[in-house]
């Protein structure tokens, strides 16, 4: 009885709130609008970040190692343009290549480096001459010279797969972007000012952001389009191009999903309530909540990252639920002849508590991601939970005040929906009877299905493959596949070897080991990841040693004489090439060992990384510090975090929501039992994923927690009303029927809105979003069916004693 | 009306004013170019390379420089660190714009002299922040000069002059989009300069931190060059010259391959 007393007290608080809002409708609306405006002002600070780094939290040791690496050696994520002419070593193709190279070099902003056959370092010896020049410094002008150039290029191991395909058909232009936005247009006085500034006091550095990267890619695409022609195939790939494509997809999908969600919600609201106010008020509420949430992200400097794409339409669909429940009761009250104000107060009093609780459970479901190690998922969790709560506040304030001030014509229903209502009522009543009368077989069937689903779900595999999120026909996806096929890879894994001593890399033994590792790794075909190319300082030394020895092939090795090594490096430094600084620090204590591998599902990378680590450990032991980094390690870390975060957030969401349910119902046993209709659909969806071959990735991992958070709303409404009616009627079947006929209609509508809201993602460009939308929609529908069938069955079993009339009086006692 | 008249006068004067400033700048640069730097010079150069983390490497080099007509002969031997001791460089810097410098290198451990082909003026001088062009005099005619005003450098008045390449080939050869030079008025020497590099959005800052009159010749005995990108120093080189002596008895036979292989 205590629970009933608390419930009625809370209801009276909500009624008092509604009455207050009806009296002060104008000030209430103005206050909310001003708050929304203040929050939405942050929209102008909102930035998009789809970079690989954005998936990790600031301070993540893997990210810090990567930043340190880039500080020393520059960026490893390059834009790669592959050039495939009919015949590469011919005047027309090379002229085309040079034109393209020059156009890129002069027009692409924020370019740190550009390397192609035009300017690749060509180090060779000719009699007493050591030639260090650009590969196309001297333009071949006879068939013979072209053939000579071809032979020279194909014979150079440093070019293979990095500059040219092993068959000589495809060459690349690699564009390294600046790490920080440049400021070439510095004024003279500004520039001179730096003479008197100490370097330490130099201003803060801005990482090259998505906007600058967008300008770079746009400029590259424009130039590539100008130079592309028949017989001169150009493709653009590389991590910056992939992340930029993802950004384009994100923006398109976000716009499309918001528009569609708004339209679908409007149509459904009108279909059910047939009133302009019932469409406009909830839409205004959720759109304001959305703008406030995104504005808040802007204020707090949280960027829009890939998973955030689901936030807007999610908030719209979820936020509308509370409004629907309030409106459903409000319109019923009006139909029952209550005055406008009484109807509002009655609706808020009746539905206020379940609306509050469902918002809290939804926020908890999402909030469970706030502790995720994958930064954008944590942001999504945090801000969608905040958004749900903002929507709740706006709903509880704006809806009553709005309803009170809406002109009568807008409240009027446009057409009777009686027939549809009758059909719905019949169906709902049928569900009630079916569930209660077949309780045992239904519960057994669900338990059996859940058991099978657990078995299937346990076999689910994780995945992190951002490229596979893009549609197959998108150019960057095809280009990456082509470049991986022709040149063996477009993703970098970097190893930094720290000898700990100055000139440690003058040590012959160290260089021999580095060279040995390169040979082993390149030759190994046993693993899932095949390395396309490896480059280290040892390669540079071998190249210069060969060139100093008249280009004889047998001298392509680390010099026998250790004393020669520093002198050859000095020679290289003085040759005018700055390539050494990309591979070794100025003290010759730290070296970079760079591997180019094909784009794969990140799942394949951790074993490869472990293998590389083991090889370095075997080669160097304690003699040197080895750090593995590069884009590949970031992707691996993201996958690792995804797995950990998924498990953690499922656990948090499950426990927190179960506790909330127990608190709401006031009984541990019934609370636990009532979670069955919520957990079973999630298990079924996980099983469905296994059957359909959909892996758990950053997006599909969200399905479980989000679905539990949402599905439980219906269960909350069901349980809340069921217990009210059970107290009143004393009959489980009557209570279930009454529950489904009143609250069931709103559950049906909100679930339909939510499912439609998630199914909208099936129209997205990004495949991961399609999977996410489909799976979440299916889960919500399954959960609704579970609430209509399994929940009544469970209640029938739980209160089976109440089938005897004398037990009716003990309905609320346990 | 009065303002309009002033504006009209200003417009009329402007075309005449700008060339006057350019003329003055050229005149100043001619004075800089005409400054006596002796026929030949020997010195011990210490070269300190400083990376962005503050790690330093120092090299000691014995240098011999001699004018040959408009060209310059240059012979250098590494004194330290010990693992490159006696490594030698011989260069012939040609004033002719289209002619690449000749460079030879002797590696004592290889016991071979190699002629290095393809080294351009814009390339780094021995892995420092200085380019070969920075180490030699600029050809006056290859640049357009503009007087931007006057500034003080460490309390001494200096002309502020902007130099822009006169042609695309000069721009490419030097690798500079433009330079701003501070020429100390009393000695007609460039004491500070900022060079805008054509690639990578970088700037190079030259600061002459040591200037001495040796054998009657104003000599830059300490130079600091910083490569800066977005206000952050990426790398820095400090060159110090000790034991500078001018107009010694240096014959052209010193600047030969035989001497390079023989060492000092």
Image: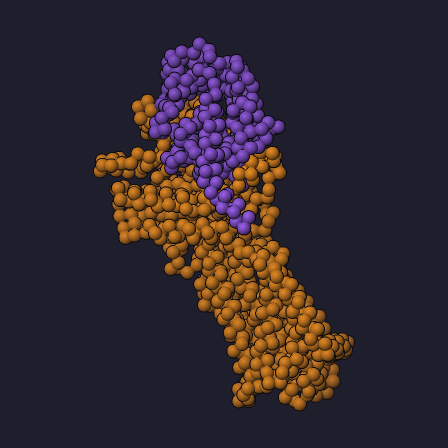
Chain colours: A orange, B purple
Name the residue at 63% across, 63% down: A39
Rendering quarter of residue B99:
top left
At horizontal 39% and vertical 52% (from top left) the residue drawn is A221
Residue found farthest to the left:
A143
Q: Is residue B130 above or below residue A357?
A: above
Image quarter in which the N terminus of chain A is found: bottom right
Q: Is residue A53 visible?
A: no
In depth, the one of A154 and A577 nearer the eye is: A577
Left or right: residue A147 compared with residue A419: left
Q: Out of A745 and A583, give the one closest to the viewer.
A: A583
The spot of residue A316 in percent (x, y) is 57, 70
- Indicate whether B31 appears above or below A118: above
Residue A501 percent across, percent down from the top left? 55, 28
Q: Can I make out residue A543 in this image? A: yes
Q: Please tell me in which quadrant of the rendered image residue B177 appears.
A: top left
In the rendered image, residue B24, in percent from the top left (x then y), is placed at: 48, 31
Determine the residue located farthest toward the top in the rendered image: B249
How many numbered discs, if any? 0
- In the rendered structure, the answer to whether residue A398 lies left or right of residue A561 reads right
Classify residue A748 by image quadrant.
bottom right
**Whole-percent x and y of residue A640?**
54, 52
């Amino acid at each position: 009885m205590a629970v009933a007393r608390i419930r009625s007290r809370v209801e009276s608080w909500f009624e008092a709130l509604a009455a207050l809002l009806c009296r002060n409708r104008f000030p209430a609306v103005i206050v909310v609008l001003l708050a929304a405006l203040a929050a939405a002002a942050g929209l102008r600070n909102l930035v998009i970040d789809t970079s690989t780094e954005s998936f990790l939290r600031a301070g993540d040791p893997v990210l810090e190692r990567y930043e340190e690496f880039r500080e020393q050696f520059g960026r490893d994520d390059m834009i790669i343009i592959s050039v495939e002419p009919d015949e590469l070593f011919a005047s027309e193709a090379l002229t085309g290549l040079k034109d393209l190279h020059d156009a890129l070099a002069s027009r692409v902003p924020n370019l740190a480096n550009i390397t192609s056959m035009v300017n690749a370092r060509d180090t060779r010896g000719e009699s007493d001459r050591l030639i260090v020049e650009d590969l196309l410094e001297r333009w071949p002008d006879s068939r013979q010279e072209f053939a000579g150039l071809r032979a020279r290029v194909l014979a150079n191991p440093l070019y293979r797969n990095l500059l040219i395909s092993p068959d000589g058909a495809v060459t690349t232009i690699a564009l390294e972007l600046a790490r920080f936005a440049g400021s070439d247009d510095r004024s003279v006085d500004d520039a001179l000012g730096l003479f008197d500034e100490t370097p330490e006091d130099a201003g803060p550095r801005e990482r090259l952001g998505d906007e600058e990267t967008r300008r770079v890619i746009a400029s590259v695409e424009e130039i590539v389009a100008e130079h592309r022609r028949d017989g001169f195939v150009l493709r653009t790939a590389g991590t910056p191009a992939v992340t930029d494509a993802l950004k384009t997809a994100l923006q398109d999908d976000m716009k499309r999903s918001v528009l569609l969600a708004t339209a679908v919600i409007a149509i459904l609201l009108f279909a059910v309530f047939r009133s302009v106010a019932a469409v406009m008020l909830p839409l205004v509420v959720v759109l304001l909540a959305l703008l406030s949430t995104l504005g808040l992200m802007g204020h707090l400097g949280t960027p829009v990252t890939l998973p955030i794409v689901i936030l807007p339409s999610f908030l719209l669909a979820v936020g509308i639920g509370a409004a629907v429940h309030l409106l459903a009761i409000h319109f019923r009250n009006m139909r029952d002849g209550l005055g406008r104000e009484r109807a509002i107060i009655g609706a808020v009093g009746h539905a206020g508590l379940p609306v509050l609780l469902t918002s809290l459970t939804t926020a908890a479901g999402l909030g469970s991601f706030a502790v995720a190690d994958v930064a954008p998922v944590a942001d999504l969790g945090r801000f969608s939970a905040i958004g749900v709560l903002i929507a709740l506040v706006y709903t509880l304030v704006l809806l009553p005040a709005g309803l009170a001030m809406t002109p009568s014509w807008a409240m009027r229903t446009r057409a009777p929906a009686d027939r549809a209502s009758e059909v719905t009522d019949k169906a709902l009543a049928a569900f009630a009877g079916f569930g209660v009368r077949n309780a045992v077989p239904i519960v057994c069937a669900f338990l059996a299905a859940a058991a099978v689903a657990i078995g299937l779900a346990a076999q689910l595999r994780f995945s992190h493959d951002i490229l596979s999120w893009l549609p197959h026909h998108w150019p960057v996806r095809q280009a990456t596949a082509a470049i991986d096929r022709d040149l063996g890879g477009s993703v970098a894994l970097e190893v930094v070897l720290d000898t700990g001593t100055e000139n440690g890399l003058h040590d012959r033994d160290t260089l021999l080991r580095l060279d040995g590792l390169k040979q082993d790794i390149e030759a190994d075909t046993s693993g899932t990841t095949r390395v396309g190319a490896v480059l280290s300082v040892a390669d540079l030394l071998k190249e210069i040693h060969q060139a100093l020895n008249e280009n004889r092939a047998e001298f392509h090795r680390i010099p026998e004489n250790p004393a020669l090594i520093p002198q050859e490096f000095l020679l290289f430094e003085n040759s005018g090439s700055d390539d050494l600084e990309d591979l070794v620090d100025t003290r010759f204590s730290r070296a970079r060992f760079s591997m180019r591998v094909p784009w794969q599902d990140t799942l394949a990378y951790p074993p490869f990384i472990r293998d590389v680590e083991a090889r370095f450990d075997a080669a160097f032991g304690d003699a040197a510090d080895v750090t593995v980094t590069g884009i590949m390690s970031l992707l691996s870390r993201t996958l690792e975090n995804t797995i950990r975060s998924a498990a953690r957030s499922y656990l948090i969401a499950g426990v927190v929501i179960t506790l909330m349910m127990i608190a709401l119902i006031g009984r541990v046993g019934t609370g636990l039992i009532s979670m069955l209709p919520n957990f079973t659909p999630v298990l079924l969806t996980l099983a469905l994923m296994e059957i359909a071959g959909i892996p758990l990735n950053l997006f599909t991992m969200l399905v479980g927690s989000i679905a539990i958070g949402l599905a439980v709303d219906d269960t909350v409404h069901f349980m809340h009303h069921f217990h009210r009616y059970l107290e009143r009627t004393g009959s489980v079947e009557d209570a279930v029927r009454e529950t489904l006929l009143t609250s069931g209609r709103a559950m049906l509508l909100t679930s339909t809105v939510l499912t439609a809201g998630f199914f909208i993602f099936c129209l997205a460009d990004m495949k991961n979003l399609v999977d996410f939308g489909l799976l979440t929609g299916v889960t919500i529908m399954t959960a609704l069916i579970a609430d209509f069938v399994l929940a009544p069955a469970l209640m029938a079993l739980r209160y089976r004693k109440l089938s005897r009339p004398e037990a009716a009086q003990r309905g609320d006692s346990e | 009306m009065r303002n309009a008249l002033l504006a009209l006068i200003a417009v009329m004067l402007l075309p005449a004013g700008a060339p006057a400033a350019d003329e003055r700048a050229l005149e100043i640069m001619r004075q800089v170019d005409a400054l006596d730097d002796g026929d030949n010079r020997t010195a011990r150069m210490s070269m300190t390379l400083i990376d962005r983390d503050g790690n330093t490497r120092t090299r000691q080099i014995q240098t011999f420089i001699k004018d040959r007509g408009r060209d310059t002969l240059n012979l250098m031997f590494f004194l330290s660190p010990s693992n490159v001791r006696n490594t030698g460089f011989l260069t012939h810097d040609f004033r002719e714009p289209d002619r690449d410098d000749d460079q030879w290198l002797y590696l004592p451990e290889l016991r071979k002299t190699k002629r290095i082909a393809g080294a351009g003026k814009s390339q780094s001088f021995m892995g420092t922040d200085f380019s070969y062009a920075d180490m030699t005099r600029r050809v006056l005619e290859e640049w357009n000069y503009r007087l931007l005003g006057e500034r003080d450098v460490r309390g001494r008045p200096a002309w502020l002059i902007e130099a822009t390449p006169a042609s695309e080939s000069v721009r490419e050869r030097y690798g500079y989009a433009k330079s701003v030079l501070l020429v100390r008025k009393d000695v007609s020497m460039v004491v500070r300069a900022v060079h805008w590099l054509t690639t990578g959005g970088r700037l190079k800052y030259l600061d002459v931190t040591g200037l001495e009159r040796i054998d009657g010749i104003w000599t830059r005995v300490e130079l600091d060059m910083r490569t800066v990108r977005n206000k952050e120093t990426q790398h820095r080189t400090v060159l110090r010259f000790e034991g500078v002596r001018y107009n010694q008895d240096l014959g052209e036979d010193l600047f030969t391959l035989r001497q390079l292989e023989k060492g000092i």
